[in-house]
Image (cartoon, rainbow, N blue to C red):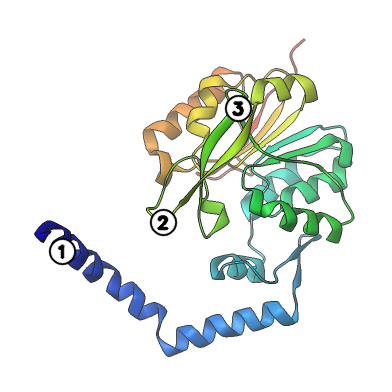
Amino acid sequence: MVETLKHAYWAMREHYPIWRRYNQPDEIRRRAALRLRAWRHPVVEIEGVRLYRGTGLTIPTLEVLEAGSYEAPEMRIVRHAIRPSDTVLELGTGLGYLASLCAKVVSDSRMHTYEANPALGPVIQRNFRLNNVSPQLNICMLGEENGSITFYVMKNFWSSSTIKRHPNAKAIQVPMTRFNDELARLQPTFLIIDIEGGERDFIRYAQLDGVQKICIELHPHVIGAAAVAEVIAFFKMHGFREEPTVSDPDHKLYLREPRD
């Protein structure tokens, strides 16, 4: 009992400064103004893609949408690399931004995107309608085997993962489809991977037959620097080279010449 009280006391001491800053009058007014702007102007356009920012999104999400910086590094990479002849397979749809961007280039039938969080399904479809596109959306996770897997949902959707990153993360069961089966069926030339640390497990089972381009976000703060180094080594081992003109430390474009 004493240890429990000590733990609660120190946790309160640790989080009190954050709580105090969050509840400052200026900060409360700033958040209220941000939500009011989102309510008055619920659709924003980022690099030609329209996104809905109405109810249900957190303050950090509204901030990056208003700033026009949502998935900016990935957008830079995709715009540089994509061609109309590509077939795209995306792991981690998010709000549907990159899927919409890609569908405008390669057509709906060659844009395949997978999102594990079922709560994002209606949001994604709404954004697709805003952009007059219909990518092939699958609400499931791509993984090592067919079945189901525990997925931890966070308030900020982009932190949701198969890795429990916070005590308040909500554990749900989501369907899982075997990645290598989908790779063989769809034969993508371009992979987009943003799976919040799941790249550590991805490299242990993934085949890359036919893939020529990979856009990946790395998450050293989730899986650690050593695991990130393993991911980078995996792609190099499979004949990919980093394209430095559009890559940065956490967002990489890997290219591989077609094999004869």
State yes or no: discs 1 and 2 in contact (Cβ < 8 Å).
Answer: no
Return the residue at label 3.
147
Q: Which residue is drawn at 60% across and 27% down?
A: 147
Q: Which amino acid does label 2 sit on?
A: Asn
Q: Residue at x 60, y 85 (%)?
A: 33
Q: What element carries label 3?
A: strand
Residue 233 higher or lower than 194, as above or below: above
Q: Quadrant of residue 59?
A: bottom right
Alpha carbons under labels 2 and 3: distance apart? 25 Å
Dot 1 or dot 2: first in sequence order is 1
Q: Which amino acid does label 1 sit on?
A: Leu
Q: What element carries label 2?
A: loop
Dot 3 or dot 1: first in sequence order is 1
Q: Observer-nearest residue: 7 or 160? A: 7
Q: Residue 168 carries which label?
A: 2
For label 3, the crowd category at 10 Å Cα-Cα, with few meaning under 14, some 14 to 19 and many 20 or more, is few
Alpha carbons under labels 3 and 1: distance apart? 41 Å
Q: Observer-nearest residue: 107 or 248? A: 107
For label 2, the crowd category at 10 Å Cα-Cα, with few meaning under 14, some 14 to 19 and many 20 or more, is few
For label 1, the crowd category at 10 Å Cα-Cα, with few meaning under 14, some 14 to 19 and many 20 or more, is few
Q: What residue type is labelled 3?
A: Gly
Return the residue at label 1.
5
Q: Observer-nearest residue: 43 or 253? A: 43
Residue 94 visible at all? no
